[in-house]
Amino acid sequence: MYNGFMPVQNIESILKKLSHRPGVYLYKNEAGEVIYVGKAKDLKKRVSSYFRKMKDRPMRTQKMLEKAVNLEWIEAASEFEALVLETNFIKNHRPRYNVLMKDDKYFIYIKITRNEDYPRVLLTRRIENDGARYFGPKSSAGAARRTLTLLQKLFMLRSCDLNIEWDDGEAVVTKKTMAYPCLDFHIKRCAGPCIGKVTPDEYYKQSIQNIEWFLEGKTAAIEGNLKDQMTEAVAKKAFEKAAQLRDKLQSIEDLKLSANTTFMELDSADAIGVFLDQGKAYFAIFMVRESRVVRSENFLMQIPEGDALDSDFMNEVLSSFLIQFYSESSEIPELILLPQLLDEHELLKQFLSERASHRVDLNFPQRGPRSELIQMAHKNAINFQKQSQIKFLKDPNGPEDRMEDLARVLELKKVPRRMEAYDISHFGGEGTVASMVVFLNGESAPKEYRHFHLRSLPESQIDDFASMKEVLSRRLAHLSRPSKIWKVKVKEGICELLKSKEIQAQFAWKLTSETPRLAEISDLEVKGDLPFSVAKWWISEFFKKEKLKRVYAQRVFTEHIALLDMGFTELKNKPDFLAFSGATIQSGAFNSSPDLILIDGGKGQLSMAQLAMTELGFEIPMIGLAKKREEIFMPGAKKPIILPKSSPGLKLCQSIRDEAHRFAITFQRKGRKLE
């Protein structure tokens, strides 16, 4: 006898209306939420079975019926179409009583932006129809990042997010997010597309094509390509390049040796192992390409409470996994090895073949090498369960989880490895200071912290908006490439002029190797009556003692009165030996470009910080966090984002915001004690 909350008259009415056609049915609770989605070859027979007297009805089904108050259904042209509809509904509604991939929103893909002249390889959490190529999904963001690091070492892949276009035989940077060329170019980990050292065709041949083959597991193709390039380099007597290519070939050979498990009868296949434990299904997939196990991935499925873990239920779990995982996968092999036969074997083969655009076979091996591979995958699934339990007990929401959650919520292109937070502090308008706090990989990095004395505000004036603009301008100026170069001759009495104006300065300098009697200068901290701060210049009696002929200064801000007043003249053409590109001596904390900037405040503070960034020509993700309701404001967004208090991403934002507030107040109080 049916025991639920759906009125009997409603049930009778529904059953009369149902046809014997294939379709999808949706159970809803009192709030109108979809709590279960099912498919049926015969809708009338399948739905009727829920309301018959059953001794062995699964606990999950009984609990679902107790919550259900309404039923909707959609007829389909075929059972296959019903399966496609069911897959889409489960993905959209994530019903409580269906078997679901756990946290599939956190899946990560390797993306190659083939729609760009110089493609980038980056990590993303969603597949878009944007002309890019995707590899995944991958369950471990850490493993994906290690893969990118390896690819960069092997194939001189650019790691920046500059927009670089090839225009009339020249490389043009259309979106500047950092100074360039960066360190990767100088240590030969990047081919230097930002300065036109390589054409798009050359970059694709030596980097992108090899990376695609690597991610496909086609090491033989990579070896062939590298050997061709090495032969060409030897013919041109480019022996240094040939040696580098030889080292890359050796690295590929070493990788092949590390994947020493071979299955000669398999060319391209996935082997799936599964282990059920305490409401979860732990999956391990071994991926065989070119007869070698090239990688393995682990995934988790949530099992609704109360189900018996028997062979029938294993059939449902495996079927659900195949549909949900390969619906999100960028690559489906020709053969999938399973630990047991499935009831809907042919239907699933049809679904996967349609998804892959080629024939896909499902196989249940009972002996031989294929069976051994399934057993290996099963053992790996058991190990995954043990590791997951240890990880949960240690830290259910570690730094990695917080960063990944924040990247997903804010729809960032990459995980914010370097976060910077800014706060303003004053005492009744006096002694206004600001703090810059840095989090690296989700944890505080005190050595990177910096504080600022505000210079643009008259004493006793309170203007947090203007203060925030000044601080961001001064910080981002260290990333800016100079638009003007200024020079002054030491013999013109500049030191006396400085002394008469009572301007004091400390300095950092280095002699250029190309012209030993010249100095590049940076990181000034001036105290005196200048109307504003000019970034990156130093003048001192020290230079005169060193008998330097000239001192060069970089102007970052639009004003130049102070430089002219001190005897500088503007250079129309920058000297060749002054290759200013962000490589001058700077504070380490200011050298690195942040992945995300957090402003302590709401729309006002955020808009001024955004203005400072726009004026300097940068495009760095930026948010504001208002403390009263913990609202996250984003530039251009009409409404703030309000996350649940349990959100790992919100906890990360609160941690860095609170640390910036603490650091600013501490510094402000120290200043008052010294007065």
Image (tube, rainbow, N blue to C red):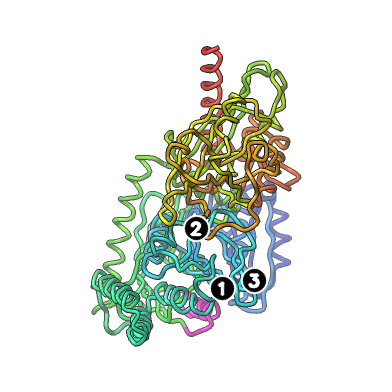
| First of labels 1, 3 by sequence position | 3
Instruction: Give the numbered dot on residue 23.
Output: 3
Count of residue discs: 3
Q: Which residue is mark 2?
A: 577
Q: Position of residue 433 (x, y in %)?
A: 60, 25
Mark 3: secondary structure: strand
Q: CA distance from mark 1 to mark 3?
A: 39 Å
Mark 1: secondary structure: loop
Q: Which residue is mark 1?
A: 114
Horizontal side of 460 relative to 422 (left or right) equals: right
Mark 2: secondary structure: loop
Alpha-carbon neighbours of circle 3 within 10 Å: few (<14), some, or many (≥20)? many
- Which residues, given as a range, are shown in magenta? 344-359
Q: Is residue 224 above or below residue 364?
A: below
- Determine if residue 49 is in view: yes
Q: CA distance from mark 3 to mark 2?
A: 74 Å
Alpha-carbon neighbours of circle 1 within 10 Å: few (<14), some, or many (≥20)? some
Q: Position of residue 571 (x, y in %)?
A: 63, 53
Alpha-carbon neighbours of circle 2 within 10 Å: few (<14), some, or many (≥20)? few
Asked whether the residues under the numbered discs 3 and 2 touch, taking CB atoms below 8 Å apart as contact, a structural biologist would say no
